Image (spheres, rainbow, N blue to C red):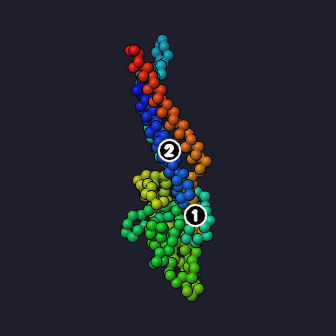
Amino acid sequence: MLRSMYAGISGMKNFQTKLDVIGNNIANVNTSGYKKATVNFQDLMSQTTTGAQGATDTRGGINASQVGLGSKLGTISNIHTQGFQQTTNNPLDLAIEGDGMFVLQETGGTTYYTRAGNFYLDDNGDVVNSDGLYLQGLGGNINIPANAQSFSIQTDGIVNYINPAGATEVAGQIGLASFSNPAGLQKDGSNLYLDSPNAGLVEGLVTPEANGAASIISGSLEMSNVDLAEEFTEMITAQRAFQANTRIITTSDEILQELVNLKR
């Protein structure tokens, strides 16, 4: 009887985690560059009551009889599918069309990766994100002089600006980081990711649009890839599953109560 109770408890814990993940997805439905997460479960070890037996000369084989002991959390995976693009007409709002990540860095510090392309110019003319991290180009930071008349960013990541004389100059070229397993990246908050041993980082920055690499779209932002209809459906499923697991505990408790009352 206690086995069913513990199985119900494990199910309640797991579906609470699933609801936590769904809630975080919904909370970030309008977060630029956010990638949704999904939860997968695994069954726990099973208690074997009778083992399997092979066939003999007189009888056929017998399958094992096992009682499961509940479920456990398998994986919480980040799904790195493309989000839709929202047009902003701000030249420093950048979206990646394809695979890859923008590379951000603090001087002499940690390297971060992101799909959120809402960038700004600081007081020195460097391209930074909202946390002041420098957007990395193929040659380091990208700087647009204060006396530039205007600037533009091409799909291959080249940043052009018009100098005071009216001539076009190149401020740099945005580089992208490529990962064989982007789901292996570790979230660090503020739309940032950190490299991990399982992410498969390709050494060196990748040139946009070279050898099939992604393109950079200026004046647009990649939004979250969360599908509200899917999340609400998963939420209802998780809620009902949670209720079903509570019913397992309630029913087991009622049967235990009947056993206790047998003496009366």
Residue at 52 percent across and 84 percent down: it is 147
Which of the two marks, 2 or 1, is nearer to us in this view?
Answer: 2
Q: Residue 139: x percent and y percent?
A: 46, 72
Which quadrant is the C terminus positioned in? top left
Which quadrant is the N terminus positioned in? top left
Q: Residue 79: x percent and y percent?
A: 53, 51
Task: Name above or below for residue 140 compared with residue 163.
Answer: above
Residue 6: quarter of image: top left
On screen, residue 260 versus residue 28, left or right, reads left
Q: Residue 29: x percent and y percent?
A: 56, 55
Task: Name above or below for residue 48 compared with residue 17.
Answer: above
**What label does residue 19 carry, if any?**
2
The amino acid on which the numbered mark 1 sits, given as a three-letter code, is: Leu
| Residue farthest along the bottom direction in this orientation | 165
The amino acid on which the numbered mark 2 sits, given as a three-letter code, is: Leu
Task: Name above or below for residue 108 compared with residue 73.
Answer: below
Q: Residues within 10 Å of mark 1 (few under 14, many from 20)?
A: many
